Amino acid sequence: MSTGRLFIIGIDGVDLAVARDHDLLLQNTVEWDLKEYPKLHTLRIWPSMFLGDLPHKNDDLPDPIAHSRSDRDEERLERANWTSSGMRILSKISHLLLPESIRTPIGAFLRDRGFTKAHHEREDWPNTVFDGVQSKAINLPTYNPLPVQHELKQGWKTRIREGDAGLEELEELAQQERDAVAEELDTVLNHGYDLVWAYVFCTDIFGHLDYEYGYPRTVERVRDEVIDPVREQLDDDDELVIVTDHGMGLEDGVGEHRPPGWLTTTVPDTDLPASPERVRFWIETFLGDRSQQKEDVLEDLGYI
Ligand SMILES: [Zn+2]
């Protein structure tokens, strides 16, 4: 007897309009205004979903962004070559030799986008949605990122700081991330997990660096290579969720995070989570209801 499993595919930074264009939306969709997240940090929004809490508002939880502000990071940021032409948003001033008074705010700018977090990936979250059920998390940011997620961030930083990592290299890493996640998903599809939650980061990078061309193409590839293979293998009573942390829009020629985040699902439920931190409760309610239904069936059949 199939138990009705929940498959969640997290895809970073997919604008709602892009999701519509690429046919990602399922039967029911909810949008999030993200007001509780100043600057819409990726590394805060995802943990909110699987923790059911805001890491930057709860003193008992580590804030993944605050963690990046170590002395060593400060030092590296000071040493970084800010005269490179790697990032379009900095290009207006890239031909200048920057004085300290300008380098410091640029360092803060990069820190605020989570660039300094890449070496400090894994939090010991005390309590998550994965704890109480048969679950499998794949490549989740701050939870269990695969090495390739780290390499993608490193490649991005190198490109920005030194201008020597081309988009082709990032394309290559993005392909590796999609392959690794798709492969793990394929392996776990028949392993009886109640909850499987996979994630890809590559869309966010191309949203920032190559909004017009690379970004929609990356979204399309995630759909074809990661989402559709799962969709095609679902049993009748399995359900699918596709979720993103924030949207992405063009500002001065550069892709920047913007609301809304969204979650879309095959679950026939009009009471979808109203914010990222409600996702955990929603999943647990879904899985609880399913296991109750399973018990009822077993009881009817006289097994329990
Ligand atoms: Zn993001």
Image (spheres, rainbow, N blue to C red):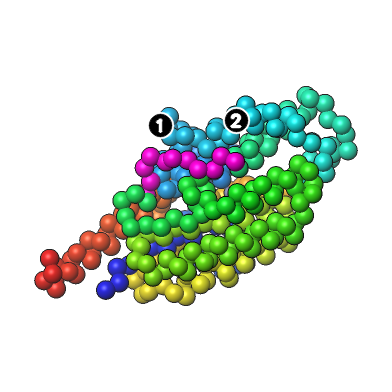
Q: Does residue 275 lie above or below 202 as drawn? A: above
Residue under circle 1? Answer: 60
User: Residue 284: which disc?
Assistant: none
Examine the image and state in which quarter residue 241 appears.
bottom left
User: Do we see residue 84 in this rendering?
Assistant: yes
Identity of the residue drawn at 87% across and 31% down: 97
Disc 2 marks which amino acid? Arg
Q: Nearer the viewer, residue 274 or 223?
A: 223
**Residue 269 image-quadrant placement:** bottom left
Cα–Cα span, label 2 and label 1: 18 Å
Dot 1 falls on a residue whose secondary structure is loop
Q: 147 or 258, which lies in front?
A: 147
In the picture, the quarter occupied by the C terminus is: bottom left
Residue 69 is tagged as 2
- Kindly check if marks 2 and 1 are in contact, taking CB atoms under 8 A apart as contact: no
Residue 232 image position (x, y, % from top left): 47, 75
Q: Which residues are magenta?
A: 119-129
Q: In the rendered image, is residue 87 in sight?
A: no
